Image (tube, helix red, strand yellow):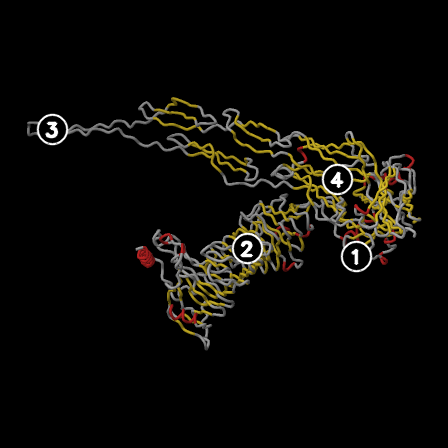
Amino acid sequence: MKKRMIRFCCGVMAAGLLLSGIPVPAMSGNMQKVAVSVLAEDAVIVTDYDEFANALSSGKKNIVVEGSFTIRDDKLTETDGSIKGQMKPVQIPGGTTITGNGTGSITCSHPIQIMGDDVEIRDIQLVFNSSNGLGSVPHREIFLAGHSLVLNNVSTYLAGPDKPNPIVGTEKELLPTVYAGGYHSNTAVGTNASLTVTNENNKTMFQDIYLGHEASAGQRTAYTGSAKLELDADAKIRGTVSAENTSLASLDFLGDQKGYDEITLSEIKGNDKTVMTVKNCAVLGVVTTGVKDILLDAGGRLQPKDGTAQLNNITLKNGGCLDLTQVLDALVKGSFTGSDDNAARGKLVLNKDGYVQIDGQISGVTQFQTVSHVIPGTILSGHAYIASENGTAGSFVLSDTAIKNNYSLIRKNGTWTPYINYVPVERELGSIEVKSYPKNVVINHIPTNMEDKTGDSPYLNVIWKDQDGEAYTFDDVVNYESFYDNMVLIRSDYWNSDDEEIQQKTDWINPIRLDVDENEPDHYYLIAYGKVQTGKYTLLFCLEPIERHPDTVADVKALKDTVLAEKEIIFTDEPGVSHQHVAGEPVKENEIAATCTQKGSYDKVVYCKDKGCGEELSRENITVPASGHKKGEPVTENRVEAKVGVDGSYDKVVYCTRCKEELSREKVVIPALKEPDKEEPTETPTEKPTEKPTETPTETPTEKPVHKHSYVLKKTTEATCMKEGEKIYSCACGDSYTEKIAKKSHTPEKKLTPAKPGSNGKNVTICSVCKTVLKQDTIYAPKTLKLSKERYVYDGKVKKPGIKVTDSKGKVISGSAYKISYQNSKNVGKATVTVKFQGNYTGTLKKTFEICPKGTSISNVKAGKKSFSVKWKKQTSQTSGYEIAYATDTSFSKKKTKTVVIKSNKTISKEIKGLKPGKKYYVKVRTYKEIKSGTKKVKIYSDWSNTKTVRIKK
């Protein structure tokens, strides 16, 4: 009985499809690009499904379809389980070419599966009629099964039923979906799926194209291999092109005219292995997600839709265009590459009120304009359109039209902003970014001229910036400015001392200057012009040229107000201890987010990324411009409907979609309703019967005057913030009407419960009248206090490491929410950083860091009989004594290492006895200071000296 019912339903459905108005595909009516092929010698002509199936099964490579037929094969159905009755795919072997010569038409009730590479279907109408009628799951799949398919001038569009209903189906269009994987059963899937859609016509349409996807039980296998899509411009995709699950994917959208052929689709999804190219066509209004690299070439234009969270790497070539007019706040997370060729320059188009943040590197030149990619639109003078820490002033340029209208595009503090009638300010040196410099320098590695430099020669990597934060080019610095001559190298102990006797000393200098190799941009080499001294020296970069050479320490200190940066370098004559700082990627610290109206800021900090170093190399405060309000759609508030004789009104209000601030409010009047004419009914007099035959004339009816309402206010109920009020008007005739009074606005009152370590707070806004909670924000508890550095070497200066405070959700807490204090942060010992919260927070967080004593160095190790003597340099500043370690292996493993403590900081030698004759020992020394921590005494140690070796006499 069940089988009969299934067959009956299938019969009803088939009849329904015929009667419902689903059109029978015309043989050639929709084929716009007909290229009749000359039949190959081995070509097989088929006119029905049986002939077609036989040609496929017998391995025919050239199949020509004449006329129309439908593929429906009861033998190709599932027979088991929950998918019983489901259509299996028709399999097309690799190397097969199917052509309709512009007249053939195939209607598929089954999916299609490609069984090998180099399959081509051309000049044909290929449609799928499986629908969702009777609750069925439609199967209009084209399975690539990891192989390559070319669709050349193929129509795939089939309209849904004229009168959609649940029996015959509810879909307006019956379009195929392409899957790179295969049908769920008995499918061997390849690893290089490829779909090429070329010579498309206006009926070349798809629902979705999945180049990578997960498995679906009873439906399809997974596909995660490589994939390629090549799509001609007129093709239409109603939904998504997805390459999310691929191991490698290229998406090529190609057209014939620069940016005018349009490809229609809704969404493009990719991953960090996806490359997308738009060439000679436009991809418009599409949500773009996850694609790693986007190339816009030969006038190719991409217009992401609002909802695109971010783009990654963008390259514009030969007039390519990134059109961001539909995304007000755009983010390019990766690099942005323009062209150095003016003729091939691409375009960046923004909304008139738009903004784009570019996080990656910027290279080449790109034209910036607004509103349209064809005709430049209105530019807002003073509006920051582009923001990036990278690039130069010339990375973006205005259109010729904007320049003729006296606009200039100015880069200041990392933003490109247009100004009308801009008066340039004379460029001056404003700041210095030392990206890397040597920490330890072996003096023998310092050349006396640039010709003698080697791979070991020490150098600094320096970026010079003007008063607007714009970097000078290396060419400008070398040929015009010579900022690197504005430097002084002074002994660090003198520079840090306020002793009056030291101020008069003249032996402060180390004879070193900076010079450049024009083939190594931004590298400034140390060059010796006299005998270089060992020790710690501080390199001072000054704002202005030093016209008179300083004689004394006091003369150098007189330059202090002009010092833009200072870096300490240790000069040594010991080989093997040189260290060149390697700049890591900049990190953000102390970030304060910008709002619509307030600027934000953060510290751009660079640390040495060399293992074991981590020293802060530079810290620059960056200003983030206010983002500006983003207007939302107008909303209606306080609506009062119009009544007879009384105007109504409403407020047309615009809010900022970012901060919700009210931007405008306009009172709109609703005209009063007209008073309807009302007439009192009059009786029509009847003739009175008379007994006389003579006619009695009837009375002429009299008209009563029309009543006009006169409304008087009878009752007023005042509105509250919880309920509308009303005014009741009535007429003497008994008629009345009611006029609503809009609710009053709530009276907001803020109540703050500050967050504290271990406990969240909240910021609640209530109405002081009705006590309704209008808004409630959670303030997450302060949790972590992180220091930029947790170990320093004593140098007599107060140490103040940078800090970062995060809450229980890992979000950085603004520096305005706390005050910082440092305790015991000058001398050797345990220093404390205390953060005392304020505003939305309360309580404190504390963190300790260590200031260790200066180290020492071994001056001599002498072998004796079963002993050795070691001598080191005296170090009495902030020390209590020394510790000697000696071992028989270089790693100083615990089992093979012994230590000796020297309790006096004035002792500078020690004999170690009881050693094995002929044995080699490794020796190192460090200083320590004993401090009191609570009730205990603890030792704070310096770094170890360099290791020396000694072999005991036999």
What's the distance in space between the residues labelled 4 and 3, CA to CA?
Answer: 124 Å
Rendered image: mark on residue 696: 3
Q: Which residue is mark 2?
A: 245
Q: Position of residue 445 (x, y in %)?
A: 85, 54
Disc nearest the viewer among 2 and 1: 2
What's the distance in space between the residues labelled 1 and 3, CA to CA?
Answer: 129 Å
**Residue depicted at 48% across the width and 37% down the height:** 635
Label 3: state its secondary structure. loop
Cβ atoms under marks 2 and 1 closer than 8 Å? no
Label 4: state its secondary structure. loop
What's the distance in space between the residues labelled 2 and 1, CA to CA?
Answer: 47 Å
For the view shown, which residue lies furthest in the bottom direction?
41
Q: Earlier in the sequence, mark 1 or mark 3?
A: 1
Disc nearest the viewer among 4 and 3: 4
Q: Amino acid at mark 4?
A: Glu
Q: Earlier in the sequence, mark 2 or mark 1?
A: 2
Q: Position of residue 757 (x, y in %)?
A: 64, 32
Neighbourhood count class around disc 3 (C-alpha, 10 Å): few under 14, some 14–19, many 20 upward: few
Disc nearest the viewer among 1 and 4: 4
Q: Earlier in the sequence, mark 4 or mark 2?
A: 2
